[in-house]
Amino acid sequence: MTKLGEYYPMDRSRQPAALTPDYKTSVARSPQYALISLENTQSEMTGPVFGQNDIDPRDKDLIYNYAQAGESAIGERIILHGRVLDENARPVPNTLVEIWQANAGGRYRHKKDTYLAPIDPNFGGCGRTLTNETGYFYFRTIKPGAYPWRNTINNWRPAHIHLSIFGEAFLQRLITQCYFEGDPLIPLCPIVQTIPDPEAIDQLTARLDMNATIPLDTIAYRFDIVLRGRRSTLFENRLEGN
Amino acid sequence: MSHDLHVLKQTASQTAGPYVHIGLAPAAAGFDIYHNELGRDIAGPHAKGERIRVEGVVIDGVGAPIKDVLIEVWQANSEGYFANSSGSEVEDGFCGWGRVITDFETGEWGFDTVKPGAVPGRDGTIQAPHISFWLVSRGINIGLNTRMYFGDEPEANAADPVLNLIEWERRRATVIADRTLRDGVAVYRFDIKIQGEDETIFFDI
């Protein structure tokens, strides 16, 4: 078996704490004891692998993947694209990226969402794709709307798309949210502000990407994702990679 | 800058929110969109070893079940091999990874799999059979990692290098599931307490 370098630790300085009282739901859902830190073992350095047979090419097109024939989802047509990289800027190829979001009015297709904005009959709100050999992925969707939520009685989520990324190891597993450049709700959102580092918040803000827009058709936003990287195996019996 | 390390910064986590099922298990959200929802069959039809069921509930600091939690599990096969480790052969259809959702009314969850084998640890050690868990939900800002060990493996558990890192012996019991039999099938009960008395051990992996 190939000797592979171990992963860098989680950078907790850029990650939200478990307990963030301004996001009220975290108060009863946050462990109080310290986490037990583990060095990597096979259990954490391995993870599931997916292939093109597991998904459908249409899954990444949210404008059409739940629409009736000849119809499409309502809203501002956008492309969300980027690369999945590790901390060493190495691409993470063939990894599953899943997204979900509210519709253009800020309503989710979920039996637990009761917001008064209407369901769009042609919009499901989920998509998935695999990155290519350079770590690149893209989705076509509509820009989600802002919506209110019960935290204080006047909290509004900025427009956002949820993303789930696997990487190559169970310890790289990540769920996050992508925001949109210029949204005035970003600094007001208690969920965004669970992240202590303003730079880390900025990294969750997708950039308008005029070069990737399709003229007269679809506007593009760029969103790159960085997963934990791994060490080179210096001073060990077998040098690999580097 | 000649001393620039050229290291990118890790993307921060954000809560999966209450509607995580739309993205990861849309049938549970109430609609049918994918031809193949992932993570439904962990072991596949050809896996060797003992077929088992694992059940539990995730409980918050108030003592209430967390009904909107989503769990992912990752395990070796009955011989201790992971599905993606190069050079190892697992049974055709064995994935070792699963997605587990709760009953929205009760918070109860359960999944069927095979009992994993012991797995190599660091520096020539052996890890007792275990299943890795990753929990996300509304109110959880960053996924919580834990492991489930098997109550019928007292000797392996006593020698396990990870369990032995836990300074408080009493807390080790929070990650060891009791085994019972139901209609001849082994059922392991693994209740996870996020916070409070008998809080489950969580790991920074």
Image: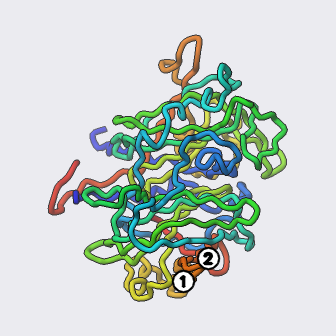
Q: Mark 2 — on which chain does it sit?
A: B
Classify residue A86 by image quadrant.
Answer: top left
Identify residue type, mark 1.
Ala
Left or right of A97, for residue A76: right
Picture layout, residue A219 above or below residue B43: above
Classify residue A127 by image quadrant.
Answer: top right
Name the residue at the top extreme: A216
On the question of residue A150 being in view, the answer is yes
On the question of residue A207 being in view, the answer is no
Viewer-closest of A208 and B22:
B22
Left or right of A158, for residue A228: left
Reading the image, the residue beneath label 1 is B173
Classify residue A189 by image quadrant.
Answer: top right
SS class, disc 2: loop
Q: Residue at x 39, y 81 (%)?
A: B160
Residue A3 picture location, percent across and down: 23, 59
Q: Mark 1 — on which chain does it sit?
A: B
Q: Residue at x 68, y 70 (%)?
A: B59
Residue B192 picture location, percent across and down: 61, 72
Residue B169 picture location, percent across and down: 50, 87
Residues at discs 2 and 1 both on one chain: yes
Picture layout, residue B59 above or below residue A211: below
Residue B99 picture location, percent across and down: 55, 57
Reading the image, the residue beneath label 2 is B199
The N terminus of chain A sits in image quarter: bottom left
Viewer-closest of B139 and B177:
B177
Picture layout, residue B56 above or below residue B152: above
**Reading the chain from its start, which is encountered first: label 2 or label 1?**
1
